[in-house]
Amino acid sequence: MATFLYKLGRLAFRRRRYVALIWVALLALAGFGAASASTATSSSFSIPGTEAQRAFDLLDERFPGGSADGATARVVFKAPESEKVTTAANKADIQKIVGELKSGSDQIASVADPYAANAVSKDGSTAYISVSYKVSSMELTDGTREALEDAGEAARSGGMSVEIGGDALQVMPHTGVTEVIGVAVAAVVLVITFGSLIAAGLPLLTALIGVGIGVSLITALANVLDLGSTTSTLAMMIGLAVGIDYALFIVSRYRAELAEGREREEAAGRAAGTAGSAVVFAGLTVVIALAGLAVVDIPMLTKMGFAAAGTVVIAVLIALTLVPAMLGFAGKRIMGRKARRAAEAENAPDAKPNMGVRWARFVLRKPVWVLLVGVVGLGVIAVPAASLEMGLPDDGSQPKSTTQRQAYDLLSDGFGPGFNGPLLVVVDTEDSSDGKAAVDRVSQEIEGIDHVAAVTPATFNKAGDAATITVIPQDRPSSTDTENVVHAIRDAGTDVKGDTGAEVLVTGATAMNIDFSQKMNDALLPYLALVVGLAFLLLTVVFRSLLVPLKAALGFLLSVVAALGAVVAVFQWGWLASLFGVEQTGPIMSMMPIFMIGVVFGLAMDYEVFLVTRMREAYVHGETPGQAIVTGFRHGARVVVAAAVIMMAVFAGFIGSSESMIKMIGFSLAIAVFFDAFVVRMAIVPAVLALLGKRAWWLPRRLDRLLPNVDVEGEGLRKDLADGPADGGGERELVRA
């Protein structure tokens, strides 16, 4: 592989105008496709194989036009002190708003008058209007949302408090500012790392081109493939991260080859053949991690994973072709005077060791202590992960300043905490001899369950073969008691079906969240096994070792568990919550662990491959295991640190989001990259390699014969090249450049 990539790098360098033109043309075509595509709607959300999803499907079938999966809203009214919502003036204002809502949008399915629907609290202080829509929240037009937001202005002027809850006001958070901050920090780090504006700008430029192509393709295909707006957000975040990383690796190796005196085309070829090989395998691990999201069997997550994986493939192709081409355009400016003098000083026989060398030598002197401090430190931070509780955020986790959170609190005060998470029980009586009696029994069974506050009378469909019952729990939607109520209803439904033939299904947002969390829990271990297992095989091929891939996988698991511990401590326990702007603690978002594993695993293997392939390369070319570790850190430590700092900056920018879900994802990814890059890769990895010595690179002979030789470290490439003549000529070429 190294020889092929070497030839590809030289070809791209020589034919740089054609290569650049091809990528610019691809960007233009993708942009034209995105601009001409119809506006994407939200991706349909379904959880195959769960009871809540089967209930939704049954509702669509038996209650046509009911918009079971449509958006909902609650306009909540609180009367002024010493008044009630049932007074003539307040009642007139509320009923006027009911009429305005009905005529405010053609997307509305129904609006319930609170006085006719018994939606007034017992003390008369609070009432709410229930609004149902024909489409999901992401498909609502701006006009529909504005009509909803304007609905309560007249009532507010009369003295009532009016707040709006439900998912109708839910929109995808805009993250443009955070992306700009991440790119700005990346630019600063790159300038410090390379000491050259040209060298710093090149990875940013090529990464943005790759992200532009990837996101434009996703936008162009959004309607055809039913891709939601979250898909492009994930692809943008991952594409920007790996795009900068991979270009950084290639440019860094190119500059190292120039510093050794090689001509520019030769340096580009060698950079592509060595660092490019590491990029290919690092990219493969990211693709495996993202495509592996299909294991969860949630269509939305599967599409997000494949789309983001496609963006990673584009980033790899750009690193192998466009980056060498851009290096050809950059000329001698890729080094800069100060950087060139520093490179010459570093390669001098009496060169002062850089920070990476000094750290590697320290680890070699104290490997046991470094290993113990790293493992014990991460182990202590991981302790809170044992208390991990997973769920999905609701309006109760919103900032207190938002109307959704205030509506949530008003409903809790007026009707009880469980009113914000009603359960919808669907009874299929098609196979029952007496459907009405079966439904009556279901209602009686539910009324006898602990922590149930209220059960509404059953509503049958026109055919009379299905009925719905609304159940109000006593506790808030995300509580353990509410989850127990869902399981208790389902257990009772099993007995009812055995006796009457009627099937009882529980759904609604709360039940859907519980089923979603359970599905994510069930998928966590298979996903980990698939991703880590495939990556172990891949790294075994790359490093031709069993212990190095094993160490890489175990180190990753340690950093992920430590990151989960930090997330639990901040977002669930409330430690340092005010520092990170966390207003409401609660369960950890159920998709966060798998999402974090997928993203961080790919990035962690990037650092592992780039750092350890340099060590493997030095070892294969005759250095002792200890010398190889020092060589790997001399050339790779600065690049890995720079890449990690850039990723942390990109992810940490999301911590400032007002959305608790985005805040949690940003924090978890940033802290996981910190643990993996600085503790595992920079400390634990060299300590373990130092203790293992030559045993680290051991591979059984039979397995060695079976595995393909991909030559990541460029051993075969070096044999094919005549190093001697190239060095002198390359040095003269560098001076002329």
Image: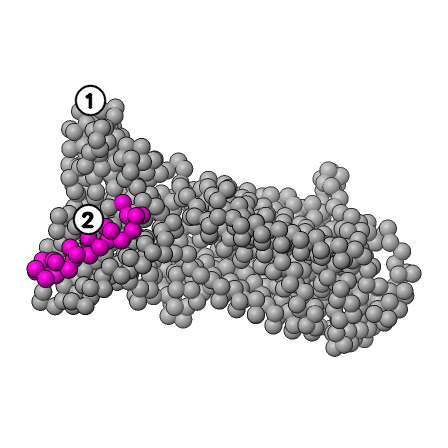
Looking at this view, name the residue that lies furthest to the right.
725
Instruction: Return the x and y of residue 380 as percentages of the image width and height.
Output: 47, 62
The correct choice, above or below, for 354 with respect to 499 in the image is: below
Q: Which amino acid does label 1 sit on?
A: Ser
Residue 64: in magenta span: no
Mark 2–mark 1 distance (CA, rounded to whole Å): 34 Å
**Under tag 2, what secondary structure?**
strand
- The one nearer the camera, 589 or 525, is 589
Instruction: Return the x and y of residue 337 as percentages of the image width and height.
Output: 76, 76
* Lateral position of residue 268 relative to residue 512, left or right: right
On the rendered image, what quadrant is the C terminus found in? Answer: bottom right
Q: Residue at x 16, y 51 (%)?
A: 114
Q: How crowded is mark 1: few (under 14 residues within 10 Å), some or many (20 or more)?
A: few
Nearest to viewer (mark 2 / mark 1): 2
Magenta span: 84-109
Looking at this view, name the residue that lies furthest to the top.
433
Q: Which of the labelled discs sits on residue 112, or is there none?
A: 2
Q: Which amino acid does label 2 sit on?
A: Ala
State which quadrant residue 269 falls in.
Answer: bottom right
- The one nearer the camera, 254 or 703, is 254
User: Do residues under tags 2 and 1 come within 8 Å of each other at their CB atoms?
Assistant: no
**Which numbered disc flags the more N-terminal residue, 2 or 1?**
2
Instruction: Return the x and y of residue 321 as percentages of the image width and height.
Output: 72, 54
Q: Name the residue under label 1.
A: 433
Residue 458 visible to an observer of this rendering: yes
Q: Which residue is drawn at 19% across and 48% down?
A: 112
Residue 88: in magenta span: yes
Q: Residue at x 54, y 56 (%)?
A: 236
